[in-house]
Amino acid sequence: MKKIFTVLVFVFSASLSFAQISFKDDTLHTATYQNEFEVVGYTKFQKTVATDTDFVWVRTVNTLPSGWSSAVCDVELCRTSTTDSADFVLGSNRMVGDFSFHFYPSNNKGKGSMTVVVYSKANRKNSTTIVVFAEIWGLGIASVQNSPYVFFPSPANEVLNVNGISDKDLQVRITDVVGNIVNESVLNSNDASINISNLSAGTYFVRFSDGDILRTQKIIKQ
């Protein structure tokens, strides 16, 4: 009987040691231009034990340039920019939930970051941390409203075209919503299209410059 009890204690202790939580990404990098309303980083929160359902997140670092604000959306709610901590539930029938981290630049360029820690109410040592960086770029020399270039169609499927190219090469960079560069091209009047068939469906930002104009345009990939 004593040996059986010892084995049961060992099994129970081992199961606790593997009751872990984590973010799919421990670091996110996001970027956009100062005329955009917000820039957002997305990730998944995941757990290994179904019965571990009650959690707390805490924003331990919130370093922002003047004029910026930020907010956290957990698996239940999008919180206000002044909320630095909140409880949330990931029910026993769910092992994964969505988190997103929002920066609002209010038309101010610069760099900011936030750090968020999540821990289990059942065991505070069972915790995970994510750091999210945001960078907001300036708009360049000319007004974004006066650009002669237009990328189309949007939504696009396989090919993205551009109107307005004349005698200047157009430097193009496409990024996803978290700031990852997914395509870089140089376009001219003889080659005014980009093959985007390899991109996943979603929202992207096209940044383009001819040396005098720097602009960004949002596109949708189907």
Image (cartoon, rainbow, N blue to C red):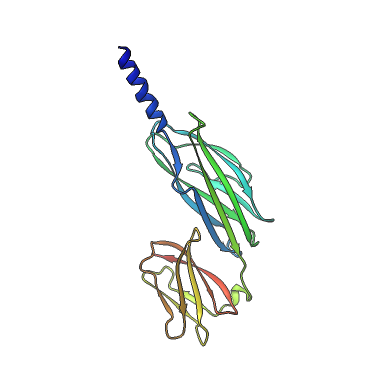
Residue at 60% over, 45% down:
80
Q: Quadrant of residue 95?
A: top left
Q: Quadrant of the C terminus?
A: bottom left
Residue 29, horizontal then vertical, whole percent: 52, 56
In this view, which residue lies farthest toward the top? 1
* Apparent side of residue 215 relative to residue 161 in the rendered image (left or right): right
> Total of numbered circles in the picture?
0
Residue 46, horizontal then vertical, whole percent: 42, 41
Q: Quadrant of the N terminus?
A: top left
In this view, which residue lies farthest toward the bottom? 167
Residue at 44% over, 80% down:
192
Vertical placement of residue 167 versus 127, above or below: below
Vertical placement of residue 185 versus 110, above or below: below
Q: Nearer the viewer, residue 6 or 143?
A: 6
Residue 205, horizontal then vertical, whole percent: 50, 66
Q: Nearer the viewer, residue 77 or 169?
A: 169
* Apparent side of residue 67 relative to residue 197 in the rendered image (left or right): right
Vertical placement of residue 16 versus 208, above or below: above
* Apparent side of residue 109 relative to residue 205 in the rendered image (left or right): right
Q: Quadrant of residue 156?
A: bottom left
Residue at 62% over, 72% down:
140
Residue at 58% over, 79% down:
211
Residue 147, horizontal then vertical, whole percent: 57, 77
Q: Nearer the viewer, residue 203 or 4?
A: 4
Vertical placement of residue 122 versus 156, above or below: above
